[in-house]
Image (tube, rainbow, N blue to C red):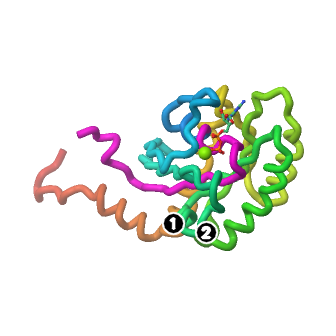
Amino acid sequence: MDRRTVWYDYLFKLLIIGDCGVGKTSLILRFSDDNFMASHLTPIGIDFKLKTIDIEGYAIKLQICDTGGQDRFFPITQTYYKGAMGIILAYDCTDEKSFNSIRNWMQQIKMHANKNPAKVLVGNKCDRPDEKISTEQGEALARELGIKFFETSARTNICVNETFYHIAKDIKNKILGEALGATRIIRVQKIEEPAKKKGYCV
Ligand code: GDP
Ligand code: MG
């Protein structure tokens, strides 16, 4: 059995949302498989990908859910948001419409997602020379929403890992912050050494 796929400290469910065509499936494939497909080969969607990463000594298994192509044919349903601990909001920096949609996607999160999931804003396709949304515009929107901003390229692999590591770290900090007392007790018990024999001296 492959130890890496079995043992982990935490399982985090992540979602990636944004208009159709912004590069959601491509970002997931770049992060999980370090792969980018030419446009005619890009799958419409996948269900999810798993990847285990190390965050400050914790093995964190990420389940990254794609829309399965649902974004192309139907509105994304409420069940998609269920159990999401982190949500990546993505727009295409060559497509103004997708940038303007981000506020609507934030509304969807408020209506359907868990209370206060970790969030990050991503301006994808920054490798393209015909950028219409500047870095400053992306940063300003992220500031307004109170979340962190990354400009990414799934194609040339810019800031894709950083985005996923950032959101995973954010969730880890939230979880440890909320469950601090319990976690500490468990860890102290784990490392407690057996009592030494009487009369024995090193
Ligand atoms: P989705 O509908 O949001 O899942 O978007 P896809 O991942 O299917 O990507 C839509 C199109 O954009 C495809 O033709 C991809 O090859 C292309 N694409 C995705 N990410 C990038 C990127 O970072 N740079 C460039 N230049 N093209 C990208
Ligand atoms: Mg897709």
Where is 109 relative to 156, above or below?
A: below
In the foreground, 127 or 172: 127
Check the picture and name the quadrant holding the C terminus: top left
**Residue at position x 49%, y 33% in the image:** 33
In the picture, measured across the screen, residue 159 lies left or right of residue 1, that is right
Query: How far from the left and from the top, in percent, is residue 166?
Result: 62, 47
For ligand 2, the image quadrant comes to top right
In the picture, measured across the screen, residue 183 lies left or right of residue 103, that is left
In the picture, measured across the screen, residue 1 lies left or right of residue 140, that is left
Numbered-mark total: 2
The magenta segment: 1-26
Q: Amino acid at mark 1?
A: Gly
In the foreground, 85 or 104: 104
**Residue at position x 55%, y 45% in the image:** 45
Q: Which mark is residue 139?
A: none
**Could you tell me which secondary element the residue under label 1 belongs to?**
loop
Q: Amino acid at mark 2?
A: Ala
Name of the residue lying farthest toward the front: 73
**Residue 12 colored in magenta in the image:** yes
Q: Which mark is residue 113?
A: 2
Earlier along the polypeptide chain: callout 1 or callout 2?
Answer: 1
Q: Which residue is mark 1?
A: 83
Q: Determine if residue 165 is in view.
A: no
What is the C-alpha distance between the residues marked 1 and 2? 7 Å
Disc 1 Cβ-to-ligand 2 distance below 8 Å: no
